[in-house]
Image (spheres, grey):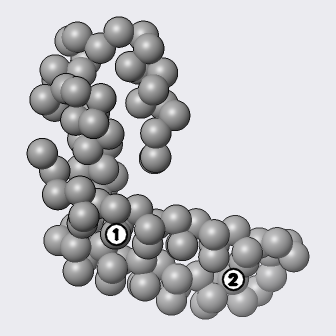
Amino acid sequence: MADKTKILAGRKAVDAYRISHSKLYEGGWHKGIPEEHTPLLGIMRKVLQEQGFWYLQDFFDTSELLNIQELGFKDRADFDARAPDTDREALDRMWH
């Protein structure tokens, strides 16, 4: 099974980034957004790297694998081959 502790820490970092990113745009776009965005992205990437995820896609793939395993499947191929519609719907509702 994927390392749940590392994935949960990564999810927390991504959630914090998403919240902060949304706040940047609350007042509409302004000239300083790119400069304000860069540190937010850096913080998230640092936390993900501390958890062993060097690429964002690697984190998201591993996070999805944890979701699939929590539904009782071995891996994505097993899920694709055997998952009923209820499990597919459950996966859609899980953290992304």
| Residue in view at x 30 percent, y 73 percent | 48
In the picture, measured across the screen, residue 20 lies left or right of residue 83, that is right
Q: Of discs 1 and 2, which sits in the foreground?
A: 1
Instruction: Pick whichever, 83 or 80, lies toward us.
Output: 83
**Badges 1 and 2: C-beta atoms under 8 Å apart?**
no
- Using residue 33 as the reference point, say whether residue 13 is left or right of it: left
Q: Nearer the viewer, residue 39 or 6?
A: 6
Q: Is residue 61 visible?
A: no
Instruction: Give the quarter of the figure containing the N terminus.
Output: top left
Reading the image, the residue beneath label 1 is 9
Residue drawn at x 52%, y 83% is 40
| Residue 36, quarter of the rendered image | bottom right
Q: Residue at x 45, y 26 (%)?
A: 90
Q: Estimate the x, y position of residue 30 in percent, counting from the top left.
A: 80, 82
In the picture, the disc for residue 95 is none
User: Who is closer to the viewer here, 27 or 15?
Assistant: 15
Judge the density around disc 1: few (<14), some (14-19), many (≥20) Cα neighbours within 10 Å. Answer: some
Q: Is residue 57 above or below residue 75?
A: below
Q: Amino acid at mark 1?
A: Ala
The residue labelled by disc 2 is 33
| Residue 35 sits above or below residue 13 on the image | below
Say which residue appears at 58% left-offset and 66% top-offset. Answer: 18
The image position of residue 9, as x and y in percent, is: 34, 69
Q: Position of residue 28 (x, y in %)?
A: 85, 72
Determine whether the residue tagged by mark 2 lies in a helix, strand or loop.
helix
- Tell me if 39 is positioned left or right of 42 in this view: right
Q: How far apart are labels 1 and 2 at the CA level?
A: 26 Å
Residue 43 image position (x, y, % from top left): 43, 85
Secondary element at tag 1: helix
